Image (tube, rainbow, N blue to C red):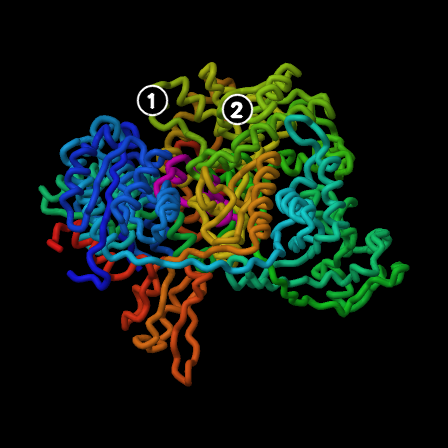
Amino acid sequence: MTRENGAPRIGVYVCHCGTNIAGVVDVEQVADYARGLPSVVVARDYKYMCSDPGQNLIKDDIREFGLDRVVVASCSPRMHEPTFRRACQAAGLNPYLFAMANIREHCSWVHDDVELATEKAKALVRAAVGRAYYQESLETHGVPVNPNVLVVGGGIAGIQAALEIADADRQVYLVEREPSIGGHMAQFDKTFPTLDCAACILTPKMVSVGQHPFIKLMSYSEVVEVSGFVGNYTVKVRRKARYVDEEKCTGCGLCQTKCPWKTDSEFDMGLGKRKAIYMPFPQAIPLVPVIDTDLCVYFQKGKCRVCEKFCEANALDFEQTDRIEEIEVGSIIVATGFETFDAERIPRYSYGRLPNVVTSLELERMVNASGPTGGKIVLEDGSTPERVGIVHCVGSRDVNYNVYCSRVCCMASLKLAHLVREKSGADVYNFYIDMRAGGKGYEEFYRRVMEEGTHVIRGRVAVVSASPQVPEEEGHLIVQVEDTLTAVVRRIPMDMVILAVGMEPREDAEEVARLFKISRSADGFFLEKHPKLDPVATTTDGVFVVGACQGPKDIPDTVAQASAAAARALAMISKGQVVPEAATATVDAALCQGCGRCEEICEFGAPIVTLEDGVPVSSVNAAMCKGCGACAVVCPTGAISVRHFTRDEILAEIDALAGVPA
Amino acid sequence: MTYTYFPGCFLKGTGEPIGASVIAVFEALGHGLEELDDWNCCGATTYSSIDQTQALALAARNLSLAEKGNAGDLLTPCSACYFVLRRVDDYRVRYPELMGQVLGVLHDMDLDYEGNVTVRHPLDVLCDDIGVEEIKKHVSWQPNGLRVGCYYGCLYSRPYGTPEEWRFPTKMDDLFSELGVEVVDFPLKTRCCGGSLTTSVEDVGQRLVYLLLHEARRVGADMLVTICPLCQFNLEAYQRAAGKRFGEDIRMPVLYFTQLLGLLLGIPQEKLGMQRLLIAPPAALLGA
């Protein structure tokens, strides 16, 4: 093997990681072994390489021995690669001349035989040294960041993120699919555990969004196309025709009062009615109605336009059409929220089949003072229930439906128990599997609700039926459950049963994920970059996920995430530029035949084939490239290689690992 | 077409009229049932709790024979056989080690099983393959003023390879409604009939029988139809004892679903084994 610029001088550092590595791997032996490898000038072992003294070892050696390659054998590069790259850089070594051997996750943590584990660690070090031999210096270049931010979804997550950014005097585009922002939170009555009214804390924020000079609210709109890369996204938004001029409309609501055509209100979960021209709820932002063209008789049969006759502002515009608006942003915050589990999927619970079996979201509307029943808890025959059962975990923690815990239902159910008792005087039974009250003030609230006299029975409800077995059950819903604390099967007659439906990814989550080039976890929610240490970023730089679209969460957690993502977006803006990864694909134009396979395979749209002097040639936009290597693999002529993962580097690594003599 | 048919032990003994009705109905619709040659016990009953490998091997042998004969579908009217045979396919995927042992047993008999057989219930074949529209063409009689409750039993809706909606099945309800029979809403569609508890733990078994029959009366059914021969047997044979125990005079005829279907198709009563019912069928059926 030959190298162009002479034999390198490599330093190898073997980390003990306390006993994490040294407990299984004989680190001294590994360091000894490394000393005998070709081009290795110095090899040491140290307790914690990532500590300051550990890093100083490297820096001092670089200077003293004139090292031009550094190999650290320690943990996963996902953990400390940036740390050691910085250490190299501080000592004047290009960070891309650093290589890492993972002898913790890939070795000591998964083995217990000291001898074999030590041999494996040696092999991994040998491979890293072999690879380092061929590594090359790479330069990174900053790309300017567009300071505008797109927020997708106008629930509490999107509202919070938008306000945080706009309050820093940065332009926000807030795109909401529905006619009004507010999301699920706008439908709730009270919020746990403080019982403050959802509208009281949400509507001021909604109003701020509507009036904010730095927020452009695009309601009744959907993102249809996203192109570009971190710092420089171009986004197409479809502004759906509402048939009402937002500029002229005063929000007086006369049109919806006069409209003669009614249907079930989506906002009221079908418990109330809305008109064909409607604002979903009185506090809607923007306070501008839309026309439901499926219901509107003018759109269906060509006659009516009663709304137009009564509109003093002359705001009706039946000629409106959908239009596409294009915006330029530097980062995107995805806050598209969740859907509730469809309770009809569990036939045992009789939702949709028996009267007075309702979902928790329906009950939220019912207990709401501005809801369809004016806050009264009523049965379908109009009477007040005397006994109400609340079934937890409907669709959650169940291998047949969703395995995960929806996290909010326990607390929401306790809140509903409190509200139902307060508003109807009914006896309330909560049926739970485990009471999950982990949050500030949550356990205290649980205790309070129990002390009020709410019954809590531990057991997953088997059946909700209307088939009585004893006279007392006649005319009632019957909840059958094993009370697992007493090991007794109980049948308890109820007048109303509330199903605490879990949270699910939205039906179009797959489509949305593709649109923003983000991934989904096994449960279908959007995938964060790191579950603990990078919870709002995604693998697509400049795209963040917040709130329940990333996983079930309650309002406090959602708001915290939204603020976190806003801070990340603002940090990008404040820095003014992003430094993309230098390990990207590069095309040797002389070898490229312009076949375009790279273009087809790339998920990120980085390679583009263009005509150069009439000849098709591919080139890779480094800012969009993730360095995944897919294009290099499909390239039939070998024209594409990935920097920092060149053929020489990878083959040397494999040869060394396999023990092929250099 | 001709389906490979697995009657199971019950249909060769006490449940013989049920088997006869299934064959008669398929014949009337122009389809043949060919009994699987050299079949053996499906492996239900106590086998499953005593020696799992043996129980599965018994079931797998039947599937292996069917596969050897290129059966594709193996049709069984017994819900217990249906459940036990289907379990083999589920375990093949989930417990490869256990299935390795089962295959070892088959190999000793020069048999093998690659999973190419689908075990099917006649209700599914009638509704999904032949189709209600086709069956309608053959209907020649409709009962007058008869209210029927449809009862499926637990084994048909168990987890092995069954889709979610089967946990509250309505297929039989829909079939008979479509054919002009008045079907009442019988909500305890998949509740336990008592199974073998009717003989081993009488008070529990009879209580379960009673609850079903009581509910059938409560919702105004004149009779029940079921797709499980064991349910049919339990609800009929222990009806008087259960009624006595709970102080209710119950006379609820219980038919296997192909018996009622056969009557609609104009098949003679005797061919459907109606004369062997323990509880006399309702008067509305006598005119058939």
Q: If the image is split into quadrants, where does the C terminus of chain A sit?
A: bottom left
**What chain is tagged by disc 1?**
B
* Residue farthest along the bottom direction in this orientation: A614
The kind of secondary structure element at disc 1 is helix
Q: Position of residue A592 (x, y in %)?
A: 33, 75
User: Which numbered disc, 1 or 2, marks the residue closer to the eye?
Assistant: 2
**What chain is tagged by disc 2?**
A
The residue segment tinted magenta is B152-177
Figure check: A646 above or below A91: below
Residue B244 is marked as none
Residue receiving disc 2: A435
- Left or right? Give the position of A311 relative to A335: right
Count how many numbered circles sit on residues in the image: 2
Q: Residue at x 69, y 31 (%)?
A: A190
Residue receiving disc 1: B199
Q: Position of residue A246 (x, y in %)?
A: 78, 59
Identified by mark 2, the residue type is: Met
| Closer to the camera in the image, B30 or B251 | B30
Q: Residue at x 56, y 63 (%)?
A: A225
Q: Position of residue B115 (x, y in %)?
A: 24, 49
Q: Give the distance between the C-alpha atoms of the residues marked 1 and 2, in whole angstroms.
A: 41 Å
| Closer to the camera in the image, A449 or A219 | A219
Figure check: A645 above or below B107: below
The kind of secondary structure element at disc 2 is loop
- Left or right? Give the position of A183 relative to A139: right
Q: Is residue A437 magenta?
A: no
Are discs 1 and 2 less than 8 Å apart at CB? no
Q: Residues within 10 Å of mark 1 (few under 14, many from 20)?
A: some
Q: Residues within 10 Å of mark 2 (few under 14, many from 20)?
A: some
Identified by mark 1, the residue type is: Thr
Q: Residue at x 21, y 43 (%)?
A: A42
